[in-house]
Structure formats: structure tokens, C-alpha cells
Image (cartoon, rainbow, N blue to C red):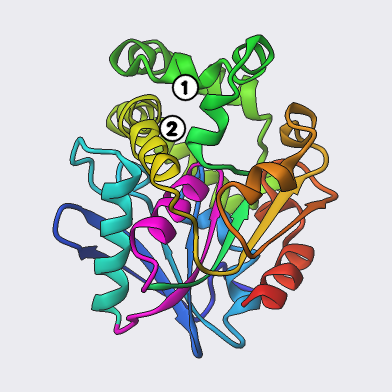
Amino acid sequence: MQVFDGFSLRCRDVGEANLRVRTGGAGPPVLLLHGHPRTHTTWHRVAPLLADDYTVVCPDLRGYGESSKPGDYSKRAMARDFVNLMKQLGHERFAVAGHDRGAAAAIRLALDHPERVTRLAVLDGLPIGAHLSRCDARFARDWYHWFFLAQQELAAAMINQDPGLWYGRRYHDTPLAMGVENWADFQRAIHDPETVLAMCGDYRAGLEVDRQHDDEDRAAGRKISCPVLALWSAEDDLGELYDDLPGIWAEWADDVRVRALGCGHHMAEEAPVELVRELRTLF
């Protein structure tokens, strides 16, 4: 079967950015947001399963893949992109699932636009402010890439000397594991110097304006108002880094379910059937 069989692909001007977007299916709308260093094609095993019952929308985040690189990579700006995108597609309210950096964007979308988001799934993620407020020597050692990539111009210059060395060493990805078309799209992205620079800009925003926005929400007592499903990968290190994920999430949402999937970090590629089962329960 062709990847994303029955889906359409086009670029859409959403105001501040131009997003490459894949859409398909019919039914209640669901927005799927990928993480670093992937593109929307990471959902190729999940989106067709959801499309039986949902209208599925998969964009490249601004700065990633073939979406434009406007310079502002704050999660607040990304959230505005998604609100505008979904309105263009005729969806005033929708469910959202975000993985990794896409999870941070999805969380900000739910906090800034509670009237839009009906359900939120966070895959291997926490609010950026929750991470940084707990940052210790272990976090700095194990998640050092947050601080390296945030040195945007320097990090991009170093990575662009040999993208395969950096991404191959860190992520151990293969065409078989990812799917051939998904792997090829990923390779095009990491070998585009402007995309690498923009992806580093995402991490710079994380340590600066994104942290500020999260801290402001915590100080004001704002929480995510919709039901939340927080999934973490049992074979990755989020659950090892924090021994009380439900307790952390209780600070950010009142209606939240936290559980693990028995897979590695890229759960949409490694455990698509199990992930879809969880998403259907939430949606």
C-alpha cells in the first residue's frame, strides 16, 4: 500500500508561515504534530489507521521539513499556525496529539486556545517549564542536546558539517525501522542547512521565550482545561528521569491519564497499533 494512501499533500499559507500539510480521512478532526528531528511523515503508520473514523491533519511544524523558516520558533507562534491552519480547513474545534517537540507545541496550543482543543495527547513530553524547573546534573548530562542545540548558529554550523554523523549517532534510524519514504523525507530535512538552523532555533526558543510562557502560566494558576492523555515510552528515559510523572502532570491539568507504552521514543513508528488504540480511547 502506498504511504498515506488517499491523503492529499499541499502547502498552506497560515499567515506567519507556510506549512506543508498532509490531510485525509473523514469524521471529527485530529491534528498530529511531529517531533524533532522528524517531519509529518513520521505519522505514516498511524494516520491511515485513524483516517477510518477521523479527519487527520499532519503538518510539518514551522522550521521543520518543507515548511517555511520564519525565524520565530516559539511554541506560541506554532500554536497560532495550527489554529489558522485548522480554521482554513473548516475545523473550529479539534483534538491534538503531539510528540516530543510537537508535544510542547500541542501543550501551548491547549493553554493558549482552550476553546479550540477538545482533547490533548502528549507523547513522550512534558511542558518545557516542567523540565527546566527540575533541571539538575542528570538532566544536563542525559539531555545535553537541549543546551547544545540552543546555541543555534554554532550548533547548526557544526551539525551541517556532517548531519549523518550527528543524527545517525543520536537516533540510530534506518529505512527499515522508519519506513523507506519516511526515512527519505527525514534525510532530506537533516541535510538541508536551513532546516537544521531552524530546528536549533526551536530549542533556543525552548530555553528562552517558551520557558517564560510556561512560567507565566504556572504563576497565574492556568491549567490545560481539556482531557489529557500523557504517554511515555518505557524503553526511553523520560520515566527514568522523573519518578512521579502523574504528580508533575497534576500541576498542569486536572483531567489527565498517564501511562507507558512498551516501545522506544518514536512510538508512532515503533508501536503504531498500540498508539492508535490509546488515541481512539481519548478521542
Identify the residue at image location x=34%, y=39%.
213
Location of residue 208 (image quadrant): top left
- Compared with 191, 255 (above or below) is below
Between 87 and 258, the one nearer to me in the picture: 258
Outermost right residue: 262
- Quadrant of the snapshot with the N terminus: bottom right
Residue type indicated by callout 1: Pro
Per the image, the residue denoted by label 1 is 163
Label 2 secondary element: helix
Q: Give the range drawn in magenta.
A: 90-115
Earlier in the chain: of badge 1 and badge 2, it is 1
Q: Where is residue 198 in the image (x, y as percent from the top left)?
A: 31, 32
The residue that mark 2 highlights is: 190
Tell me the element at label 1.
Answer: helix
As displayed, is residue 69 above or below residue 276? above
- Foreground residue, 69 or 28? 28
Where's the C terminus, which quadrant? bottom right
